[in-house]
Amino acid sequence: MVVVAIIAIGSAVVAIQWPDNQVRALEREGARLAALLEAGRAYSRASGMPMRWNATEQGFVFEGPAKQWIAQRPTHWENKQTMALLERPVVLGPEPIIAAQSVVLALRERPQVRVRVSTDGLRPFAVESP
């Protein structure tokens, strides 16, 4: 009986702490977006050309004069349930210090599940769980 109770308690603790698959997928999307935004920021800085990132109904898009670089970037989310919530496009440069900006990622079927990808303008974009 004691062994069964210990196993039950252990299972309950693991179930409480084990993140939902959709939450983990959204966090992966956030990490992927942070890496893409940093790549765009670095390219904009190195080339001296302005770059913006914007959400679309199907995914997202980089905007700017660097057409060849932009054409090589993905434009969709890996998880079809992901959507980006933002007030205005993210400006990625070319200045070395940009304005503080953030993008909130959410799931279409569960909009309360969210992660934030943000920068203070000096540090790299990073994922934050609200």
Image (cartoon, rainbow, N blue to C red):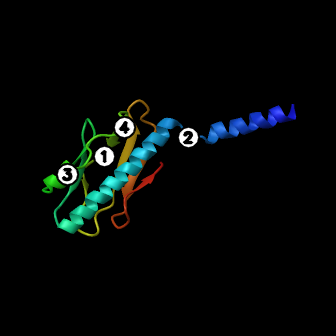
Mark 3: few/some/many CA within 10 Å (<14, 14-19, 20+):
some
Q: Amino acid at mark 1?
A: Leu
Q: Which mark is residue 19?
A: 2
Q: Secondary structure at mark 2?
A: loop
Mark 2: few/some/many CA within 10 Å (<14, 14-19, 20+):
few
Compute the Cα span from label 3 to label 1: 20 Å
For marks 2 and 1 on the same chain, the one whose residue lies earlier in the sequence: 2
Residue tagged by mark 1?
A: 86
Q: Residue 118 sits in which quadrant? A: bottom left
Q: Amino acid at mark 2?
A: Pro
Q: Which mark is residue 82?
A: 4
Residue tagged by mark 3?
A: 70
3 left or right of 21?
right
For marks 4 and 2 on the same chain, the one whose residue lies earlier in the sequence: 2
Q: Secondary structure at mark 3?
A: helix
Whether residues under marks 3 and 4 lie with C-beta atoms below 8 angstroms apart, the answer is no
Whether residues under marks 3 and 2 lie with C-beta atoms below 8 angstroms apart, the answer is no
